[in-house]
Image (cartoon, rainbow, N blue to C red):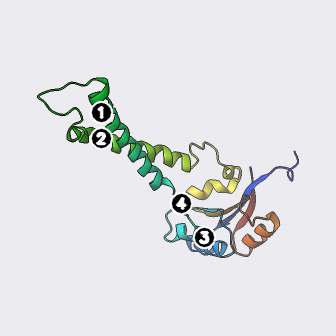
Amino acid sequence: MTPREIPIYGIVAEFASPADLLEAARATKQAGYTRTDAYSPLPIEGLAGAVGGGHSKLPVLVFLGGLIGGASGYLLQYYTAVHSYPFNIGGRPLHSWPAFIPVTFECTILGAALTAIFGMLALNGLPMPYHPLFHVGRFARASRDKFFLCIEARDPIFDAARTRAFLETLSPTAVEEVPS
């Protein structure tokens, strides 16, 4: 494949300071780009909002995981106490729901916790041992002293030439295409 035939992941711009990155992220959001990401060696206040971090589906998944876990724990106890192995002790009813509450609570917590862990991994696309940005040699400094803003090729308004020209108007120190 020639260099022009290799599909690109996006275009990344390097900035010298956190203020430059934050300003560029805000300008990118105002320009209508929605599939962007910023990389910084330190937390920058307001960057998540400037990049346009959306709402996560994780709270709904955790709620459903807890609900399913609790219902499963309760139904397991109900089935074993009433249908599978009914054992009448001292005249108590077979379906004695107060006795089922501790296990139901614990199963709710277990279901929610497991859903939170695996849901977070799935929604973040993890594990991802290799990211396309690792092809950019300058990106190695993202964990030390440089700041990067990437516009992904899957953005609805992405056009390689126009996106590169737009990023160059933001005064970066470098702009590069990121191969897939």
| N-term mark: 4 or 1 | 4
User: For the residue labelled by badge 2, is the local secondary structure a helix, a strand or a loop?
Assistant: helix
Residue identifier under label 4: 41
Image position of 80 with respect to 41: above or below: above
Q: Is the C-beta separation of discs 3 and 1 under 8 Å? A: no
Residue identifier under label 3: 21
Q: Amino acid at mark 4?
A: Pro
Separation (CA) of disc 3 from disc 4: 12 Å
Residue identifier under label 2: 104
Residue 131 placed where, x, y %? 65, 48
Separation (CA) of disc 2 from disc 4: 43 Å
User: For the residue labelled by badge 3, is the local secondary structure a helix, a strand or a loop?
Assistant: helix
| N-term mark: 2 or 3 | 3
Q: Amino acid at mark 2?
A: Thr
Q: Which one is in front in this view, the residue at disc 4 or the one at disc 1?
A: 1
Q: Is the C-beta separation of discs 1 and 2 under 8 Å? A: yes
Residue visible at 88% across and 48% down? 2
Residue identifier under label 1: 77
Q: Amino acid at mark 1?
A: Gln
Q: Which mark is residue 59?
A: none
Within-10-Å neighbours for mark 1: few <14, some 14–19, many 20+: many
- Which quarter of the rendering shows the N terminus? top right
| N-term mark: 3 or 4 | 3
Residue 136 placed where, x, y %? 70, 53
Separation (CA) of disc 3 from disc 1: 56 Å
Q: Which one is in front in this view, the residue at disc 3 or the one at disc 1?
A: 1
Q: Amino acid at mark 3?
A: Leu
Image position of 67 with respect to 45: above or below: above
| N-term mark: 1 or 2 | 1
Q: Is the C-beta separation of discs 2 and 4 under 8 Å? A: no
Residue visible at 66% across and 72% down? 28
Within-10-Å neighbours for mark 2: few <14, some 14–19, many 20+: many
